[in-house]
Amino acid sequence: MTLDNKGETSRIPRSLARAMALPRPSGLALDWGALDWRGRLEQSLTQEIEQRRVFPWIAVCFGLGIVLFFQAESPALWAPLAALMLFTAAAVRLRHNLFALCICVGLGALFAGFSAGVIRTRSVDAPVLTRIVIAPLSGFIEAVEDREEGKRILLRVISLQGTTDIERPERVRVSIRKGDNLSAGHFISGTARLLPPPQPAWPGGYDFARDAYYKGIGAVGSFTGTVRQSAPPTSPDWSLWLAAHVDEARNTLTQRIASAIGGAAGGVGAALVTGKRGLIAEPTNDVLRSAGIYHIVSISGLHMVLAAGTFFWLVRALLALSPSLVLLWPVKKIAAVAAMIGATAYCIFSGSDVATERSLIMTLVMFGAVLADRPALSMRNLSIAAIIVLAREPEALLGPSFQMSFGAVAAMMALVPLMQWRRDEGAPSTLIEKAFSWAGRSAFGLITTTLVASLATAPFAAYHFQSLNPYGLIGNALALPLVSLVVMPAAVLGVLAYPFGLDAPVWMLMGLAVEKVLDVSAWVGGFSGSTVVVPALSIGALAFLSLGLLVLTIPASHLRWFALVPAGAGLAFAATPHRYDIYVDREVAGAAIRNGHGELSLVGRPSGFVAEQWLRADGDARNADDASLKQSARCDRLGCTVETSGQRIVAFVQEFSAFEEDCRRAAIVITRLDAPENCGATVVLDRKALAERGATAIRLGQGGLDIQSVRKGQETRSWTVTAKASPTSTQDRPRRARPVPEQDIPEDEISSGEPD
């Protein structure tokens, strides 16, 4: 008890009295008890509820359920649906208990995401080729993409000789070197060489087979001879008719834009409007990548926002010319409807790719909020868009496009307002002061948004592409104003003028701006260190960094500071990558082995694309044709050997007669042959083992070997195919490893993995 200044007694809390009775330490000390952690936490949670920041975690739980689905093996549909109904009923029953309600809704969203994955996988189920086939092929052309070396065609298969109805793919992607008269909708036939869609080149690498499965592509390859047009045996259905007409219109406009502009700028300008990137030469792609602005040539969020924004601004400005319309009609909502219609038409015309559809959904949600008199840009709307996108295409969660686009938008919405331009006291009075103030605010806003977006997408770029562009801030700051203020408005105007035949001057104007963008890209890309190759992030590093981004962007209170914990853990994992020491190709065409100097050495003849994937995963900037990659391997006609840093011998066997010596002295034997059963090597990766496990990677440690494979033994996935085993008796074993032509897959047959 104590007396206050009025002489009355007051009670001292027991915790404070105990603290006062203890001896005081010397120096400054922080009274942790006085911080009232519980009160601060309750205050933060109340703020989260008031600002509706609990809802976005539903989208996070939905995505977590999709992640769990892709870790499962052949899951049943009834189990997640039953769990979803159970937690939905529990949420209704416990709706008056806020904590229990949040738990039940979160678990219900998790199982809803799991169910969406099962339903989507079953809905796109189609045959996937399991072997190499060289046979007559016929079908309807669904889409055509012009490239420097020919055409790449998406073909809807009608017949494939040598296959049954059960194993014949519904769609294949094939290349044609000479096909000048071919266009979407034609029925063609010819002899084709088809392969199963390639699986990852290393555990954790880009999985083209999975992406192809969800796109309905069951094989890739090329026509080997003359391609003939003929009358179709049946009439195409409405979906094929619509897809063919849209693709033909896109190709016609692409050629018109490219010819009007000319040169490298023509291909880039056409890609900015139609999304057809085949006319962009690879050196131009490299320049855009090194400057960190390659995303501008992919029809995605930037293009959709600029196109819809242009429609919105034009319609609103035209309606504002009439005072009576402004007073009597909701001009803003009418402009929003026009922007939604224009964005939908643009999505259909640009090919309705996955990234474009995601951007359309986000745009429609934002303008729908305008119609409902809600803030257009809010974390709640972004969460709704994410749930819709993932419910429709759960596989998008695993791709760089979804991760980078939603990560960048969330970061900009949460962090850019915290770095707004702070005005000094007093508004600018003169016209010059106003101009400088506007220019300063615009430049500051562009720099902050670019910086925030670059930092938010850096973990995903490092994981998927193993590269960072340190000068991307400069490239985007210089190029995006041209794209936003000149290129995209000109693109919209050119598309509107195209039916009247008055579009040529517009394309020429747009081409001048595109040329300046390429000049800026070449200048920025010429800086030393413009592209930094980094080792591939581990799943743990990506998971922690992603969690840190979520905790940083979703909360509106001081709870966002907890993001430092997972972000710090993710950076620690990223700073100490556990590189693989041996990479083995899925067809055992070759391998990459770390030599005694700590660098990878190539043996065998892996394809250039596969070798590039291995090098990038290791953080090695060398090209696949670099002569230094062959120097550390000792090779003869029987095979190759490489000595690792731990003085282990790794043998790559080409001739059966080499097994006797290599199995005796090598710790690891790699071969496309069938190794003898009595081979004494610690690890034997032969044809049979790799056919079951796919591409394999090994870490050499002091305590043993860590072996990882694309497939875990006999696990099955809808998009994976296992090579059929051939006889393994002694008389049937080949004495020499055969060439592996199926490994020489042209790079254009495999998606570059760039964010769309």
Image (cartoon, helix red, strand yellow):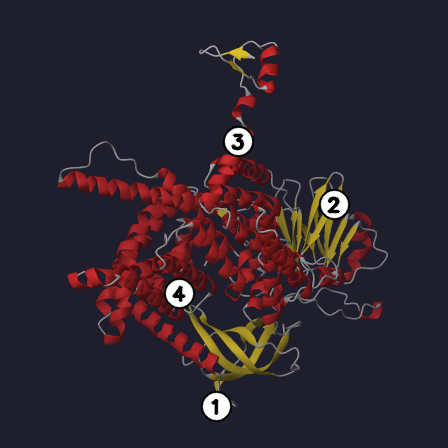
Residue 719 is situated, as x and y percent measured from the top left of the image, at 63, 66
Judged by depth in the image, the label closer to the viewer, 1 or 4, is: 4
- Sequence-wise, which precedes: disc 1 or disc 4? 1
Q: Real-space Cα distance between discs 1 and 2? A: 59 Å
- Identify residue type, mark 4: Gly
Q: Residue 705 shows which numbered tag?
A: 2
Residue 240 is situated, as x and y percent measured from the top left of the image, at 47, 80
- Identify residue type, mark 3: Gly
* Residue in front for this viewpoint, 201 or 227: 201
Image quarter of residue 318: bottom left
- Sequence-wise, which precedes: disc 3 or disc 1? 3
Disc 4 packing (10 Å; few <14; some 14–19; many ≥20): many
Disc 1 packing (10 Å; few <14; some 14–19; many ≥20): few
Q: Real-space Cα distance between discs 1 and 4? A: 30 Å
Q: Left or right: 249 with respect to 625?
A: left
Residue ID at (45%, 74%) = 143
Which residue is under mark 3?
A: 39
Residue 523 is situated, as x and y percent measured from the top left of the image, at 34, 47
| Figure check: 630 above or below 115 | above
Is residue 527 visible in the rendered image? The answer is: no
Q: Real-space Cα distance between discs 4 and 2? A: 46 Å
Residue 76 is situated, as x and y percent measured from the top left of the image, at 69, 65
SS for callout 1:
loop
Which residue is under mark 1?
A: 231
Judged by depth in the image, the label closer to the viewer, 3 or 2, is: 3
- Sequence-wise, which precedes: disc 4 or disc 2? 4
Q: Real-space Cα distance between discs 3 and 2? A: 51 Å
SS for callout 3:
helix
Which residue is under mark 4?
A: 275
- Determine whether label 4 and label 3 are within 8 Å by CB: no
Residue ID at (56%, 46%) = 98
- Identify residue type, mark 1: Ala
